[in-house]
Image: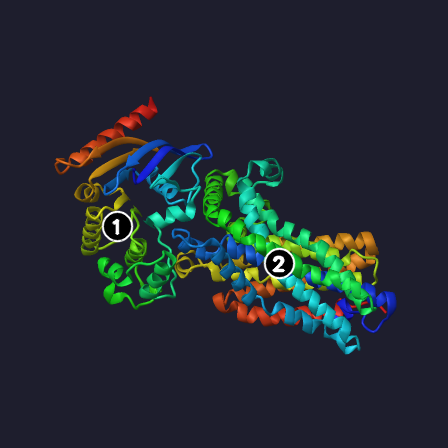
Amino acid sequence: MVQPVFLGFVGSSGGAWADGMYAVMLRAGLLVIAVLSLDVYAALIRSEDRAVLDLHPVEPFEVVTVEVLGVALSRWWLVPALSILLLPIGLSGRWDGWALAVGLLLGSFALGLCASAMVHLLAIEASESPKWEGVLEAIRGSNPREQAAFIYAPGAVLGGCALLVSQAAYAVPSIAAGNAVAGVWLVLPFIVAGMCWSAVPQVARNAWFQASGVLADIDARYAAMLDDEEGRRVYLDWMVRFLPADVAVWALKDLRHGWRHRRTWISGAWFCGVAAALAGWSGSETAPASAVAVGLGAVWLLAAVGVLLESDEPEFLRAWLPAGGAPKRMARLAVLLAWLQAVLWPPVLVLALRHGSSAALLALAVVGVAMVAAAVISMLAASLKERGLLLYGPVAALSAAAMAAQFAVVPT
Amino acid sequence: MSAVVFEKLRKEFGKVVAVDEVDLSIEPGTFVGLIGHNGAGKTTTLRMLMGLLRPTSGRVLIDGLDVMANPREARKRFGAVPEEAAVYPYLTAREYLTFIAEVRGGGDVEQALALTGLGEDADRLLREYSQGMRRKTALAAALLGKPSVLVLDESLNGLDPPSAAMVKATLRQLVDQGTTVILSTHVIETVQAAADRVIMLAHGRVVADVSTDGMAEGDLEDMFLRLLEETRDAGRS
């Protein structure tokens, strides 16, 4: 599945190999950084440890170190997993290219952890700083101003690191071609990671305790927003107007539940949609297949939220609420399909612009069918409550792989 | 030097003024009861004292240290039990307290367990504890490192009568040794029985600051209800 979609350049030589290596390494490096950035945010800002520790005179740098190490340990598999996916590069005889790619992944891992720690801690200071007030006010949307700093921090990490990773990705084929000086770009992520980490002790001392007060204010403002009718509005809640009354009640419950407790998954749909669009934003003939593959993976992954919503419900609520039956299942299906639109349309629009209507229609059909299938299976698996993921996970993985193998292929 | 000083403390949540210009000074070795109706601003005031909430204006000093400007140093000086005590559920009480003792730079875990009556259950996982027992664990944690100020936010709620009596006796003993205790509650009898000084909040303001010396049973409740009615009437007019 991976080789035809992302590693179509393997076996080629010269410029095609270099372009392919650059493209795949840039995406792999950014993926590592994006995952780590979100995890480091959760660990440093919204960790359960904060509630226990922030009453005590902890040394903030020690707490930050432990939290970041925790993220590193929980995500250790990222580099090996991506290295395995990139094995076709080595198996084609270019073990030098594969080794350099692994080096870039390690650099991205170090950079993702250290830069995220520094930027997320700085975001705490920025959230309260008068200097940033105007900027945050302009970009906060309907969120409290302080929250805007946290919302955009992962993007800032990704944007900043993208420059370095892009240069390192350029360097990989260049070094393989014998330009040893380009090795500097491959080492640079490690150096910048070290520089970021060296700033963390001071930033942590200023910011770690401060975050508790900022978070309390943010939560209080969200609570105040929820007190008035406008504040009860959640993402896509207007859709319930178009549903039958008995379905609309359950749909609104799912929309609110999802937006308040599983927001990362729902916002993540947009992130994945943009990722799929970026995969398609290229003149390469492999771009439509890449966009479809990313879209398929995202759809099958994100539809798991349907199962998670069910497993979130405490037992007493299940007993207390009416059973729901068919209207509840219809509502879950409608809500999942609505959330997943964010994965579908960005790549379809990009493919229409860059590769014409036939590529766009193919993506629309394939990702659209995947959306319906994933939502239906997620809805059915949800009836198993907490065990639903045990069914949904393997079915989703197999379905995503099968669909990608069938449809996300490079035309010959 | 005062143990705790609130300087023109104010907290707004949007249009709501939760705490309005609170000015107080609390001497070392005093047991202060903070009482008020629901929503009076007790928890908000104490959360600002604990450094968990930023004042909109004003500041809180503990032993002369600004809590927000010196968060770590201030935390060395106070121990706190918030209304909803968070603990690590997969540690036993003894393990948890040993960890907190290390964080707080020392403290006698066995003594803290004994003072809070947790000795027999010290080796059970905290996830098996009732809410009341978790609160006692949080109190034991707050006692470690011998803080000069102890802050308890509705911490006697949910304790069975013998446990509540034991905790009150422990707090009294600490006050006699020079610790300052600030206990918020809406149970007036608790305050009248234990506190030296009672501060009454209504609608975010201090409406009474009295000593309990010579106060007869029921006096405090009568005063509280009368002041509450007056502030409500003042708000209407």
Viewer can see residue A262: no
Q: Indicate the amino acid at tag 2.
A: Gly
| Position of the N terminus of chain A by quadrant | bottom right
Q: Which residue is mark 1?
A: B156
Q: Indicate the amino acid at tag 1.
A: Leu
Residue pictured at 36% horizontal, 50% vertical: B76
> Does dot 1 land on a helix, a strand or a loop?
loop
Q: Is residue B54 above or below residue A41?
A: above
Viewer can see residue B123: yes
Residue B45 in the figure: left or right of residue B180: right
> Does dot 2 land on a helix, a strand or a loop?
helix
Q: Is residue A182 above or below residue A225?
A: below
Residue pictured at 72% horizontal, 63% vertical: A186
Nearer to us in this view, B180 or A222? B180
x, y (%) of residue A221?
48, 40
Q: CA distance from mark 1 to mark 2?
A: 48 Å
x, y (%) of residue A204?
51, 51
Mark in the foreground, 1 or 2:
2
Q: Which residue is mark 2?
A: A194
Residue A282 in the figure: left or right of residue A112: right
- Callout 2: chain: A
On the image, which quarter does residue A196 sit in? bottom right
